[in-house]
Image (cartoon, rainbow, N blue to C red):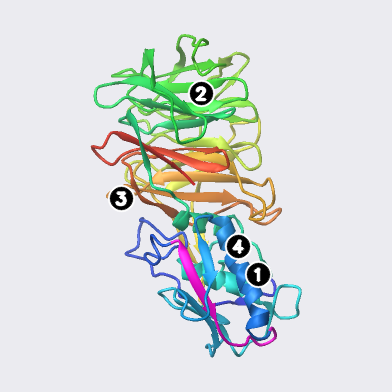
């Protein structure tokens, strides 16, 4: 992470130390503890900021700063009190180069009395709105962000709105509602897909039930009674994609049948429920994944048995074309696919046996010529002159991908954001996520550091979809828990 033009070290909050090295849950810029379970905060302010003035001039800036976080996570509420607030803001001496500091418990914020500020970025000095918003983020439980134009970057810059990294982080702490258990059961990861104005879920049954089941929701919370496909079965989880006209479902066979199958429908397989069709030329030990790439159904899968290669095919001219092996990559689980920010295909997968790292690659529109793989990573900016740290996520299972669109005021309106989710490494059944976005026009997309979905867990990766302006997740429970759970953020 390079220092932005005109930027300076903004605060003295230290970055977290690496915990043991190797793969493991890393911070998305979230404190390990803090205000969990609290959403209603009082705040107080005293002192005079050099270049801005006393409380009459500073208070409107602070109201606006708190409002940015409340806008991003509507469950948050802030109210000003005369003194002794949950978050007490004041002016005092700080050791240079820090111009703001938040205590580890989040209860006190200090602005430097040795630095000159302007109320906002239109003034000649450092924006107080920028620094106050950053320090309030720390008080709420955020550490440093990964992207250069994030409010939570360690460097102070001119930005005065939250970017997608800030937005995702605060919602990760404060906008996940309690999980909802559905009246379904499964052995594998359920699939989610937005089909017009309907959210569709498909899954393999629990225990010895290898049927494929389906349900749909118009609000993401209330689901229709489950429907069983009597003519198909799978040992893995199915996958879904919608091309604007037809809903596609793909899966692998059951028992020793590792063949790949598909069907598509214009009405959620109610009346238009054609017989299953096999690819004939391909197989997988895991269920395949499917996405619509530039209008073309595109499927990816791991090979059969001990073949850890990754393969792909596209549906053109009324049939699935022959498989393409993606060179020099491998996986021990099902890979994920979605349309990339630039309109081509993006893949995400965990490594081969013994390698729980996550890798990604892309292909241009209309092509399956994928670029060399890149290990997923992000940079955590250093603090107080320290250099950045690179962190890498890991997973014991295959990840999932979905395309979402960030809300205006947090990144460029209409800008594409890719949402990735996975379960943790061996011994960690928590659910984690990251976002991929181009935060600077013309620059390469950047992964945010990962966040944990609070108080949930799964032995499989979750299904994800962007529905009614929310990320919706659905997952199987931990280990022997075959329940199906869901929530939205």
Element under disc 3: loop
Q: Nearer the viewer, mark 4 or mark 2?
A: 4
**Are the residues at dot 4 and dot 1 in contact (C-beta closer than 8 Å)?**
no
**Residue at position x 49%, y 15% in the image:** 269
CA separation, marks 2 and 1?
45 Å
- Residue placed most toward the observer, 396 or 141: 141
Res 323 label: 2
Q: CA distance from mark 3 to mark 4?
A: 33 Å
| Residue 65 picture quarter | bottom right
SS label for mark 4: helix
Density class for disc 3 (Cα within 10 Å; few <14, some 14-19, many ≥20) is some
Vertical order, 327 against 128 (above or below): above
- Left or right, residue 457 beside residue 311: left
- Looking at marks 3 and 2 on the same chain, the residue that comes earlier in the sequence is marked by 2
* Magenta span contains residue 47: yes
Residue 336: where, in percent of width, then height? Answer: 47, 36
Residue linked to disc 1: 4
Q: Position of residue 429 (x, y in %)?
A: 31, 47
Give the structural element (helix, strand or loop) at label 1: loop
Residue 255 left/right relative to 335: left
* In contact (CB < 8 Å): disc 4 and disc 2: no
The residue wearing badge 4 is 68
Q: Quadrant of residue 333?
A: top left
- Which tag, 4 or 1, sits closer to the chain's start? 1
Q: Quadrant of residue 244?
A: top right
């Amino acid at each position: 992470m390079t220092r932005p033009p005109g930027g300076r070290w903004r605060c003295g909050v230290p970055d977290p130390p690496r915990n043991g090295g190797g793969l493991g849950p890393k911070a998305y810029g979230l404190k390990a503890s803090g205000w969990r379970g609290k959403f209603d905060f009082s705040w107080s302010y005293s002192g005079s900021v050099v270049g801005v003035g006393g409380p009459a001039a500073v208070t409107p800036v602070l109201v606006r700063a708190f409002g940015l976080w409340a806008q991003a996570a509507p469950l948050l509420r802030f109210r000003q009190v005369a003194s002794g607030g949950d978050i007490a803001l004041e002016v005092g001496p700080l050791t240079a180069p820090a111009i703001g500091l938040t205590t580890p418990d989040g209860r006190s914020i200090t602005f430097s009395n040795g630095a000159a500020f302007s109320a906002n970025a239109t003034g000649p000095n450092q924006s107080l709105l920028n620094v106050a918003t950053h320090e309030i983020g720390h008080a709420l439980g955020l550490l440093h962000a990964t992207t250069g134009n994030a409010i939570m970057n360690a460097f102070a810059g001119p930005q005065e709105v939250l970017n997608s990294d800030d937005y995702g982080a605060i919602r990760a702490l404060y906008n996940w509602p309690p999980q909802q258990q559905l009246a379904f059961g499964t052995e594998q990861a359920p699939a989610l897909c937005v089909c017009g104005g309907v959210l569709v879920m498909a899954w393999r049954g629990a225990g010895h039930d290898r049927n494929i089941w389906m349900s749909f929701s118009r609000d993401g919370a209330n689901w229709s009674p489950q429907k069983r496909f009597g003519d198909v079965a799978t040992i893995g989880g199915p996958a879904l994609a919608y091309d604007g006209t037809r809903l596609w479902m793909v899966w692998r066979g059951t028992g020793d049948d590792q063949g790949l199958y598909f069907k598509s429908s214009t009405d959620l397989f109610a009346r238009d429920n054609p017989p299953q069709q096999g690819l004939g030329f391909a197989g997988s030990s895991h269920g395949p994944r499917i996405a619509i790439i530039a209008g073309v159904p595109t499927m990816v899968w791991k090979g059969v048995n001990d073949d850890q290669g990754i393969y792909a095919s596209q549906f053109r001219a009324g049939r699935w074309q022959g498989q393409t092996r993606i060179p020099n990559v491998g996986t021990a689980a099902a890979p994920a696919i979605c349309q990339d920010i630039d309109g081509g295909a993006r893949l995400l997968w965990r490594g081969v046996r013994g390698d729980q790292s996550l890798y990604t690659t892309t292909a241009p529109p209309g092509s399956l010529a994928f670029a060399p793989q890149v290990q997923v990573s992000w940079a955590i900016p250093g603090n107080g002159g320290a250099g950045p740290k690179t962190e890498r996520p890991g997973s014991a299972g295959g990840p999932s991908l979905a395309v979402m669109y960030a809300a205006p005021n947090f990144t460029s309106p209409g800008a594409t954001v890719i949402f990735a989710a996975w379960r943790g490494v061996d011994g960690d059944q928590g659910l984690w996520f990251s976002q991929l976005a181009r935060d600077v026009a013309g620059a390469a997309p950047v992964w945010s550091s990962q966040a944990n979905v609070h108080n949930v867990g799964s032995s499989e990766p979750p299904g994800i979809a962007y529905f009614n302006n929310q990320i919706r997740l659905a997952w199987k429970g931990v280990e022997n828990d075959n329940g199906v759970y869901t929530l939205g953020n």
